[in-house]
Image: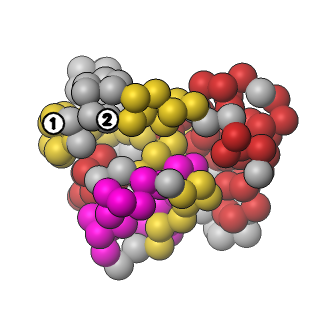
Amino acid sequence: MKSQELIRAIPDFPLPGILFRDITPLLKDKDGFKEAIDLFVDRFKNRNIDYVVGVEARGYMIGAPLAYAIGAGFIPVRKPGKLPYSKLSESYALEYGTNSLEIHADALGNGEHVVVVDDLLATGGTAAATRRLLERLGAHIDSFAFLIELEALKGRQALPGVDVVSFIRY
């Protein structure tokens, strides 16, 4: 798979001991980027998804073209202070610290079907916080989908009872 060859490993970023998986070479390569998006589209094109929820920031790069390709809307989940309207917030732990995420309070109605997209699943903290936000809004989560999964960090364990899809595993 060309997509996997285009992911760069950067040691000690953003902190010592972290091996960062950089997708910018993949985004730059038109064939590799298309292949990566097509993996998501093929998986979700017939699933009756109302919205693709993308997690800031690299989840937008996958989520927006996916939403377009499957005829769904796109909803951003953002880091604090970025959304201008009434919002909900959830805190979470990172592999290297803590943060929080926000979503507009009127982003979803009760029972709408969503797939959550991000570039990477590590410990699952970001995904679990996103899940809590969506559950507070009454969304039906079809799946969580990641381009990359760092299996040793066991992020799937943070998402019990929901479909988790990843295409490249380390």
Which type of secondary structure does the marked residue at label 2 adopt? loop
The answer to whether residue 53 is visible is no
Count of all numbered marks drawn on residues in the image: 2
- Residue in the image at 47% along x and 60% along y: 144
From the image, tell me which residue sits under label 2: 18
Work out whether 127 lies above or below 19.
below
Which type of secondary structure does the marked residue at label 1 adopt? strand
In the figure, residue 134 lies in which quadrant?
bottom left
**Category of crowding for the residue at label 1, using alpha-carbon neighbours closer than 10 angstroms: few (below 14), some (14–19), many (at least 20):** few
Work out whether 38 lies above or below 29.
below
- Residue 26 on image: x %, y %: 68, 32
Compared across the picture, whether 105 is left or right of 114 comes to left
- Residue 106 on image: x %, y %: 34, 43
**156 is within the stretch colored magenta:** yes
- Residue 60 on image: x %, y %: 53, 34
- Residue in the image at 39% along x and 44% along y: 107
How far apart marks 2 and 1 lie (CA) works out to 15 Å
Compared across the picture, whether 40 is left or right of 84 comes to right
Work out whether 9 lies above or below 41.
above
Residue nearer the viewer, 30 or 107:
30
* Label drawn at residue 98: 1
Residue nearer the viewer, 1 or 73:
1
* Label drawn at residue 65: none
Compared across the picture, whether 141 is left or right of 87 comes to right
**78 is within the stretch colored magenta:** no
The stretch in magenta equals 137-160
Taking the view exactly as shown, the residue that stands out farthest to the bottom is 161
- Residue in the image at 15% along x and 36% along y: 98
What residue type is disc 1 on?
Answer: Thr
